[in-house]
Image: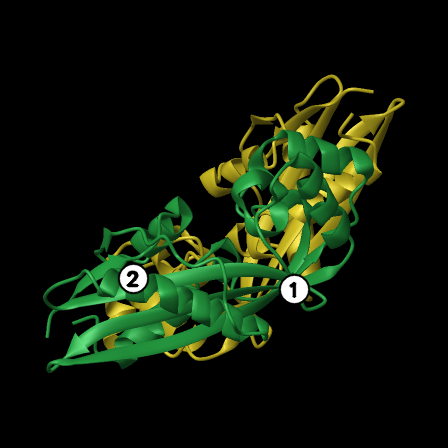
Chain colours: A yellow, B green
Amino acid sequence: MKYQIILASASSRRRELLAQIGIPFTVQAAEGEEKCEARLPQKQVEELSFHKALEIAGKAEGNVVVIGADTLVFFRGKPLGKPRDEKEAAGMLKTLQGQTHQVYTGVTLIWHHRGALRQRSFHERTDVTVYPMTEEEILDYVKSGEPMDKAGAYGIQGLFAKFIRKIEGDYYNVVGLPVGRLYQEMKAEGLLQ
Amino acid sequence: MKYQIILASASSRRRELLAQIGIPFTVQAAEGEEKCEARLPQKQVEELSFHKALEIAGKAEGNVVVIGADTLVFFRGKPLGKPRDEKEAAGMLKTLQGQTHQVYTGVTLIWHHRGALRQRSFHERTDVTVYPMTEEEILDYVKSGEPMDKAGAYGIQGLFAKFIRKIEGDYYNVVGLPVGRLYQEMKAEGLLQ
């Protein structure tokens, strides 16, 4: 069975990652839900990714696999979303500097198999340790504009690389899509023939 | 004191990483030594990075900081260099798949301070865990050409991302330059004013 793969995300970073591992796909961005009922970080990101995948799967026809993904940054169990303004961005960075936090990406695959809808959701967690940052470094980084569209107010793949001490887990999970795990899951489900 | 920063490496990956963190620099590629006397992985990469930095520092004039770097992949304490041919590349990948290995990058900074030559060498270690790979996946990856100019026969920043289960340490250290640690060391030595 040959599937057409649809990425249900407007994120250019996710698009680049999927292209990087050589999987052909098209993009149909889902609006997504802002709210979710789950409490646990791993359940929150899986639920949010499920909403995105379902939204696009509902409109799709033919042999398609829809990939939904959602990334959240957690510090001591509390989620940090995208900052609303520079002040909030500086506050988030002040929280994260010198500490270890968790990045969760939830992924949901939805596809048809012999007339039945099938679904697989999973998540990856990566621990990220940030070097201590001075007030000046935080303000300079906020001024670069990089934090504004990113959960937790930083982009590990950009300028912020110089403040990362170490990670434990998948790097690409922090960028926004755990491509190693995604490839393994799709392979196991026979979605990559 | 304002320093001109020279990267003593021909690697386009190291150049991109240094540019990514916003440090202005020029490139003067060192030939480097193939041999080194050290036995321990961390000493080997530091020694090799020192040879590169010294080679360029010996030709440089004015207020310069020279950055030398060397990356080696170790499996159970044995170094894996760049594969000489496709067969060797496939052999290395067969060794690494399904296992955890170590990537060490050594970095040496050489600069002048008040008429005296100063030096600082350090290293970072990252543990990389690779998913099990089939014979076919190994051959396909070798055919992509990506392994040929890379220590350990893979590029974490390329197609190989889909075979990475997790890492522990700095991601950029695996790409070839631990930019977080490098930035911190240069800041501490007052080389970034």
> Looking at the figure, which quarter contains the C terminus of chain A?
top right
Would residue B26 appear left or right of A166 to someone viewing this image?
A: left
Label tally: 2
Circle 2 marks a residue in which chain?
B
Q: Can you tell which mark lies on residue A41? A: 1
Residue A94 in the image, given as x and y percentages of width and height: 37, 76
Q: Can you tell which mark lies on residue B55? A: 2
Circle 1 marks a residue in which chain?
A
Specify the amino acid type for callout 1.
Pro
| Circle 1 or circle 2, nearest the eye | 2
Residue A130 seen in this snapshot: no
Residue neighbourhood size for the residue with mark 1, other residues' Cα within 10 Å, grouped as few (<14), some (14–19), many (≥20): many
Residue A131 in the image, given as x and y percentages of width and height: 41, 76
In the image, A139 versus A116, the foreground residue is: A139
In the image, B49 versus A160, the foreground residue is: B49
The answer to which image quadrant residue A6 occupies is: top right
Mark 2 lies on a secondary structure that is helix
In the image, B168 versus A160, the foreground residue is: B168
Q: Which residue is drawn at 56% across and 56% down?
A: A171
Residue B135 in the image, given as x and y percentages of width and height: 81, 37
Q: Which residue is drawn at 50% across and 67% down?
A: B36
The answer to which image quadrant residue A85 occupies is: bottom left
Mark 1 lies on a secondary structure that is helix
Would residue A32 appear left or right of B164 to someone viewing this image?
A: left
How far apart, in angstroms, are the residues tagged by discs 1 and 2? 51 Å
Q: Where B190 sits versus A112, above or below?
A: below
Specify the amino acid type for callout 2.
Glu
> Looking at the figure, which quarter contains the N terminus of chain A?
top right
Residue neighbourhood size for the residue with mark 2, other residues' Cα within 10 Å, grouped as few (<14), some (14–19), many (≥20): some
Q: Where A180 sits versus B61, above or below?
A: above
Residue A188 seen in this snapshot: yes
Residue A138 in the image, given as x and y percentages of width and height: 29, 70
